[in-house]
Image (tube, rainbow, N blue to C red):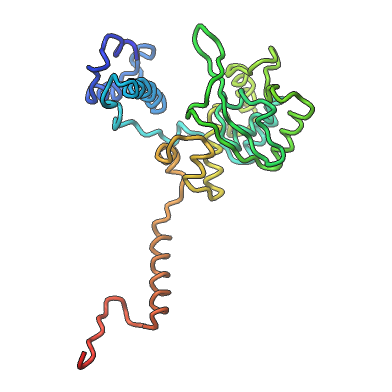
Amino acid sequence: MLPRWEAVALRDIRFDDLQVWTTGLSVNGSVRFEGKGLSASRVRQAHQLVGAVLRFAVKAKHLAANPAEGIDLPDIPESEQRYLTHEQLHRVAVASGRLRTMVLVLGYCGLRFGEASALTVSDIDLETSRIRVARSVTYVRKTGLVEGPTKGKQSRMVPVPAFLIALLKTEVDEREPDALVFPSSLSGEWLTLGQARYAFQKATAVVEGCQGVRLHDLRHTCASLAIKSGANIKVVQRLLGHKSAVLTLDRYGHLFPDDLDAIALAFDAATRTTADALRTNLPLNTIRPPRKGA
């Protein structure tokens, strides 16, 4: 961001300049990745960061409109999103050792890693089988780990499968309400992303078909498994904590089945039912002649 926009005043940032910059990231990359285009997900992350700054500028009345809105962004290819099956997820979880329960929470509840790292005992409701997601831990350069609101700035209640509630019960039983559910084994404080990645990468390396799967792919896995189970777009949105269903559809729309033929069949069935209700066997394109004297 900085090499391109550091010396540019907010009022001078234009839509077309942002579009050229965003497109250029896919081709030329950034200063850090000079000569190598960034992946679609990296480009989207860069756009989100710039967009967040400009949204704040609009909110603070420094700008009348956000020039980052409506920018054409690259589609994320399926090769960048890995989805585990139920069996693979459980095998990776077992191979993750003491992080088994956390891996299953990420894969079945759709939490971001920072959200899982921030969970305390009081966030686990064993009676209703829900997890309250209200905070997230992120790494800030020169500061370290910092706890703050979730990415969407909103809390949410996430349903938990019965088998996972049983595992969570063993994690939280007889512990103080403010104790971390998944503390670091080294410090007893927040689990760092580096520590979790190290354990997770060791686990995926020994599970067939899971080599190269990233920790964040567990969130994609949750979306995939939910959609395959019949969840609609609004349910997936609420589960993942997206601000809008548009974002969810943009990320995971390709996972929903193509129901165009099913729609045509449903319309056909509804038409036949309507015809029966009207007690007529006439084709819909037939016009009944008017009665004499009418």
Kindly identify the residue that appears in the image at 26 percent across and 80 percent down. 286
Q: Kindly give the residue lying farthest to the right in the view shown.
A: 174
Q: Is residue 114 left or right of residue 59?
A: right
Specify the quadrant that holds the N terminus.
Answer: top left
On the image, the x and y values in percent for residue 115 come to 57, 26
- Quadrant hosting residue 105: top right
- Quadrant hosting residue 38: top left
Judge by depth and name the residue closer to the eye, 90 or 208.
90
On the image, the x and y values in percent for residue 205 come to 61, 26
139 relative to 171, above or below: above
On the image, the x and y values in percent for residue 163 come to 71, 41
User: How many numbered discs?
Assistant: 0
Kindly identify the residue that appears in the image at 54 percent across and 32 percent down. 155
Judge by depth and name the residue closer to the eye, 92 or 134.
134
Judge by depth and name the residue closer to the eye, 254 or 283.
283
157 relative to 2, above or below: below
Specify the quadrant that holds the C terminus.
Answer: bottom left
Q: Is residue 79 left or right of residue 100?
A: left
Q: Kindly give the residue lying farthest to the front in the view shown.
A: 61
Q: Is residue 38 visible?
A: no
266 relative to 215, above or below: below
Judge by depth and name the residue closer to the eye, 2 or 242.
242
Q: Kindly give the residue lying farthest to the top in the view shown.
A: 142
